[in-house]
Image (spheres, coloured by chain):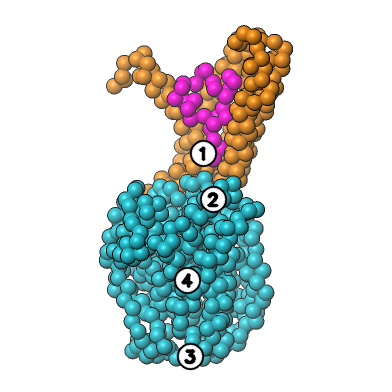
Chain colours: A cyan, B orange
Amino acid sequence: MTEICCELASESSTSTPCEKNSRTARRRRMEIRRFKFVSSVASPVTERAQKRQKLGVYKPSLSRECENAVENSALEEEKPLSVVENGRSKTKEVLIPSQSSNFSMSTVCTSPSAPVVPEVCGEYPKFGVASVCGRRREMEDAVAIHPSFCRRDLETSTELHYYGVYDGHGCSHVATKCRERLHELVKEELESKEGSSTEWKTAMEQSFRRMDKEAIGWNDSVLGAKCKCELQSPDCDAVGSTAVVAIVTPEKIVVANCGDSRAVLCRNGKPVPLSSDHKPDRPDELNRIEAAGGRVIYWDGPRVLGVLAMSRAIGDNYLKPYVSCDPEVTITDRTAEDECLILASDGLWDVVSNEMACGVASMCLRGKSQAPPCSPAEVSGFENSDKVCSEASTLLTKLALARHSADNVSVVVVDLRRRDT
Amino acid sequence: MATDDQERCRSCFLKWMNLQHQELSELDQALTLHASMTDSNEHNLSQLAQKCIKHFQDYADMRSQLAHNDVSAFLVPSWCTNWENCMLWLGGCRPSQYIRLVYALSGLEIEAQLDEFLQGTSTTGTLGDLSSKQFDLFNILQGKTIRSEEKLTARMASLQEDVADQPIAVIAKRLSRVGEMNWEVNRALDKQEEEMAGILEEADRLRLSTLKELVGILTPKQAVDFLAAGKKLHLCVHEWGKRNDDLRHGREEIIS
């Protein structure tokens, strides 16, 4: 079996702090960043000595203001797992998602892009979301979070957690559609591949392609849609969305990216980019576009056919095949040094470097215990630790706005630290 | 009489601007006092913020009353400069600007604290004064405010289009002499003005409700900070406008 392994840990110095000129900065990052795809033996199946938690029924909550606290006080005490050798002479620590008996999850989400938070018993990762309209008058970002969205029973008995950030352009409906559907498609693809669990790449690519088809199909029948483009349906072809999706398993982080949103792993306070922005001037993307007969025209930055400032996206039918919906997939082994995962739209990355984002997030995660409790306006009932990720994501969002980000800003922070330390 | 109405409108505005100056110095004083003392005067700050809102309410009420006689005086105020009038939305500021001002003020604070925070020497352990919860509430308020603004903008657009339609356009076409007045013209124009006054009233109501909600989200200290910054900005825009217009019309030497 083939596994694509992304070795990026050594390339953490890919961007400089205080990047005001985001385009130059991004180009610089892109020049340096290289993904190395290593073929290797798949990891052995991890035996999990824990009791399975029964999955409840997903109940999507789409309210504009959803504040969910899922307390799970009756969770079984779980046993630490053995360390697994994965065949690449690299020791992998198996993280235990939850040992605490009063583990809880919280998210505060308030925008139309509010993530769908399932009400479900089980083990929850800690995460936080901030998604704001910011200086735009329209909200075109969307966020989806689905803890334990899928299990691969026959394989690893592993629960998979899904995080997605979608940044729409033209209108919000493709991003909204991604929020509603992409995780379901990924789930279907993963479940249909039971028995070949490591074919992440294929599953993710297939899901993104299906998502793209659905988005375009939906554009054709957009009548009755509640979005601003409903009166201009001929333009509906010119609507699309980025998608950066991270699936976190106890051993791995699988990231599929399409567009210029980004996933960054914060490892020991240093950033490890898990995706590479799809910009039309990225040399390999430029080649791909030109090979397909398209052109990149500089019009307020490099744009495919002078229109779209990214080289891959879901939707954007009129720019096919130059704008591709194929994601780039990276698979990263989790280590004990991993602190958190940051997924964000370019509203953050345009004005905040990877280093800065990691610095802020990691400071937030580490330093919270000494900090005074949040303002009295905070919703009570959350464990202090549960707020940390929310605080981190809000802080990054505030920082983006402080630095004059002119776009919608969406930030997801996932705590990856071992819970037993 | 029309000129009387206009004079009343102007004096209503001038009183309001004087009050703004007064309130600004009160707010500034309160902030200085607050900085030098402990938290004991939070209540005073809160009262001060409420007083400012009350004044705004009174001003809006007065405007609404006067507007029924002369709405255009408020929509395109002759007491404001051309430059300032370019910035107006339905006779005042856009309520969504309040949220932008909050972001700007919060940004100022964050940049000042960033180095300390990253070095772990921050005393508060956080960046900027606004909590996650407040931030979320602002985002909701912003969405709501923008949608309300768009609705009023659309209503104003319809009203403007109506001028070129029945009945006004038809009346104009039938007139024997350009600019002639008759009861039909009066009735049509009065109706138009009445509707505009309604829109102005709703715009003021939106400004007021947005401000109220926003101050409710902020802590008393934040609220006073915000009100002081807002009033100062408003007064500055007014003065800058005069300066701009004067320079352009050559009425004044460039001030060194």
Q: The disc numbered 4 marks a residue on which chain?
A: A
Question: Can residue B22 be seen here?
Answer: no
Q: Chain of mark 2?
A: A
Residue type at mark 4?
Ala
Write down the residue under mark 4. Answer: A246
Question: In this rendering, which labeled residue sits more in front, label 2 or label 4?
Answer: 2
Identity, as a three-letter code, of the amino acid under mark 3: Val
* Relative to B229, residue A273 above or below: below
Q: Amino acid at mark 2?
A: Pro
Cα–Cα span, label 4 and label 1: 36 Å
Q: Nearer the viewer, mark 3 or mark 1?
A: 3
Q: Nearer the viewer, mark 2 or mark 1?
A: 2
Residue B122 or A392: which is nearer the viewer? Answer: A392
Task: Name which residue lies at 57% across and 77% down.
Answer: A188
- Is A300 in front, or is A230? A230
- Residue in the image at 40% along x and 85% along y: A2
Q: Position of residue B146 (x, y in %)?
A: 57, 42
User: Do discs 3 and 4 belong to a common subunit?
Assistant: yes
Q: Earlier in the sequence, mark 3 or mark 4?
A: 3
**Which mark, residue B97?**
1
Question: Which residue is more in the foreground, A253 or A227?
Answer: A227
For the N terminus of chain A, which image quadrant? bottom left
Callout 2–callout 4 Cβ contact below 8 Å: no
| Pointer 2 and pointer 1 on the same chain | no
Q: Nearer the viewer, mark 3 or mark 2?
A: 2
Residue A45 is marked as 3
Q: Secondary structure at mark 3?
A: loop
Q: Amino acid at mark 1?
A: Gln
Residue matched to label 2: A234
